Amino acid sequence: MQWGAASRLQQFWDLRAACNFIGGGTGCGLLFWAAIGLTSGLPYFPAALIGLMFVGAGLFMVWLEIGKPWRAFNLFFRPQTSWMTREGIVALPLFATGAIAVLFDVQVRLALQLPSPVIPATLTALLSLTFLYCQLRLINSSKGLPAWSEPRVMPLLGISGLTEGLGIYLLVTAFLGTVPVLLQIVALALIIARSFAWNAYRSALARTDAPESTLAVLAGANATFLTIGHVFPVIFLALGFIAPGIATPLIALAGIAATFGGWYLKIKLVTKAAYIPKFTIPAAPVRGQTG
Amino acid sequence: MTRYVMVADLRRCIGCQTCTAACKMANGTPPGVQWRRVVDMEMGVYPDVKRVFIPTGCQHCSKPPCLDVCPSGATQQRDDGIVHIDYGLCIGCASCAVACPYGARYMVHEEQFAYGDQPTEDEKVNFNADNIGVATKCNFCAEVIDEGVANGLTPGIDPEATPRCVNSCISGAMTFGDIDDPESNVNQLLQSTKHFRMKNEEGTCPGFYYIVDEG
């Protein structure tokens, strides 16, 4: 059926845009948890570097998406209202403080006698949260698409970003050594919180005039999202508590599953669920009067 | 002040798409891009069904969602209410396209012509390569309006100062004018009829009115 008489899937933002939200969410979450871990004596350098790479890769994918990539500098022109402009502005100090924090990390610091990385790492964590917030507002400002303009999409994607970041952080810390129990408990809490945010988002969307196609796509994604992103990691973490001997690989698997679940959600949300509602008119025109 | 608006009388529109053709010809838009579009809708439940034709496109909202999200400042709003795009500034991020509740924005990433690789005679004249890779949309034929006003003409009254879709409408369904002028054609029309604005509940305050009945 013709667009307007029926709803239409947006095709302006594709997988590249989804990758921006994946890279931004995962990278910012990772930078945040790496800074938290640093205060507990966990290694900062590998996780923070990977976090910066995620954010950078996401921005690179956006650069590939835009129609005039060589004009990309123009995106800084409207900080008054545009969350995309603000995202770009925050990215600059984020990379600067992130690079300094990575450089100041323990190993390098000892070798070059540099100051502690705690201050730049904390700044990076704050900037990464700001960057993530800009992304949430950016997607929520898409008033043409109920799947994105529903306000509960922001807590959902915010929690998911932190969960994805923690998922990768669990993987990195598991690879480097022991994962503190507290981190595993926080991961469990975030995974549960994300499932609640997902249900709240879908329920709120169902109460609006969102296109049926949007609701159907989200309903279709429900089982996969909950299974990969929630059931699997909870099982892996629980098994890790039961069998401490194999806890490390199980925690790593839990981290991967929690992260993949978030990525799956974002791909669905950006490329499959974003329908522009059809037109509706309050009354049929009364013909034969103007003849 | 001047606030230009479009009025579409749905009682008159017959869905002939002449406005669409006139717009495409004047602006040399690529295949699939219709700044002025006529939606063909069914209303009611069988056997009491009606066919309704709804001319649509950019609604030139007073509070356009596309304006705030534009990171480059390419989307701009004039004092007379016309929302337009500076194609030289636009980076083609499509933020505006996903912000528009009316689906009024288009983007094409490569040159396309109506019939094969070579432009038609019209496309040779009207095709604008600057529109590739950027968001595009209706601008109420602002260049025509500006030139007409500069020559002392009245948009909506004098064809030389009126959007092409309005001039081309064979049933007189489309009217253009200044809603801030109490004596204007659009004001007279709206005062004597029942009308609505599409998706006005979104808070966009569209500059596009649809007439459905007598007042």
Image (cartoon, rainbow, N blue to C red):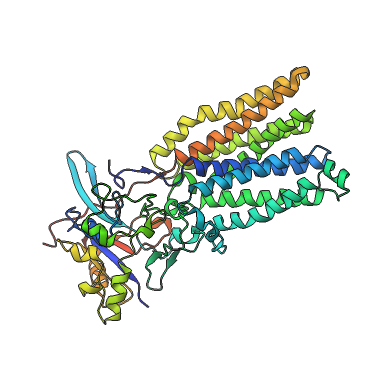
* B177 relative to B124, above or below: below
Residue A245: image location, x then y, percent: 78, 17
Query: Which is more toward the observer, A73 or B70?
Result: A73
Q: Residue at x 17, y 58 (%)?
A: B12
Residue B127: image location, x then y, percent: 30, 59
Image quadrant containing the C terminus of chain A: bottom left
Q: Residue at x 72, y 35 (%)?
A: A186
Q: Is residue A156 visible?
A: no
Q: Is residue B196 visible?
A: yes
* Left or right: B39 as drawn, with respect to A100: left
* Left or right: A265 as drawn, with respect to A92: left
Q: Residue furthest left?
A: A291
* Left or right: A166 as drawn, with respect to A218: right
Residue B8: image location, x then y, percent: 24, 61
On the image, which quarter does residue A263 sit in? top right
Q: Residue at x 37, y 68 (%)?
A: B82
* A23 relative to A288, above or below: above
